[in-house]
Image (cartoon, rainbow, N blue to C red):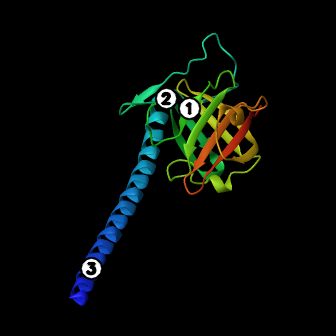
Amino acid sequence: MISRKNDVFRKISVVIGVCLLVTAIVLLVAWQWNIHTSARNAKAYAGIIRERIPEPQGAIPEERRDNTMATLSIDGTDFVGLLEFPRYASVLPICGDWGNPTKYPCRFSGSVYDRTMQIGGTSQAGQYDFYRDISVGDRVFFTDMEGNRFSYTVTDIRYEKNADQTTLQRKDASLTLFIKNIYAFEYIIIYCSVQT
């Protein structure tokens, strides 16, 4: 009798174990597919933005009476520009509204014109998947929807446990990027200064 109960228990345990394993595999495949789709869409959106903005011209950030940044809506998402890392052949579309869930890097706060812009993203493919290679001295470009192309140099990189305003704000940074490492509990904060 006890042997029969142990047999049934063993069979139930095996079935539950197999179901859990299959579920984990399905979730992993779905996650990878989602990342692949996001990376493909980011590349497509960057291409659409390039086609729709005026020919990029070199510009220097200057505070305006109105520092509001123009947006371009694509498939219901508003974008404020393109962020380029030439060394890594990366061109990223930048979403304009942090409060709107997105799979692309997004402006967290500030404006490119008054040198207060902060852009957040993750280390997944289609965003900052090259984050381990970013180094001080790298060139970074941001092109707004008016075709103004601003040039920056990475001046400092920090690894932090959070990305709050105390960590992000720095007077000598004209552009701040922060990356949530999806494989660790850390943020990579990248401070950039205007290249003249």
Q: CA distance from mark 3 to mark 1?
A: 54 Å
User: Residue tagged by mark 2?
Assistant: 97
Q: Earlier in the sequence, mark 3 or mark 2?
A: 3
Q: Earlier in the sequence, mark 1 or mark 2?
A: 2
Q: Which mark is residue 107?
A: 1
Q: Secondary structure at mark 1?
A: strand
Neighbour class for label 1 at 10 Å: few (<14), some, many (≥20)?
A: many
Q: Quadrant of residue 15?
A: bottom left
Measured as percent of width and height from the top left, residue 117 is found at 64, 29
User: Residue tagged by mark 3?
Assistant: 9
Above or below residue 112? Residue 32 is: below
Measured as percent of width and height from the top left, residue 88 is found at 62, 52
Contact? badges 3 and 1 (CB < 8 Å): no
Q: Quadrant of residue 171?
A: top right
Judge from the rendering whether residue 45 lies leftward or rightward of residue 154; answer left or right: left
Residue at x 59% of width, y 32% of height: 143
What's the amino acid at mark 1? Arg
Contact? badges 1 and 2 (CB < 8 Å): yes
What's the amino acid at mark 3? Phe
Q: Quadrant of the N terminus?
A: bottom left
Toward the viewer: 146 or 130? 130
3 vs 2, front mark: 3
Measured as percent of width and height from the top left, residue 42 is found at 46, 44
What's the amino acid at mark 2? Asp
Residue at x 56% of width, y 57% of height: 183
Neighbour class for label 2 at 10 Å: few (<14), some, many (≥20)?
A: some
Q: Which mark is residue 189?
A: none
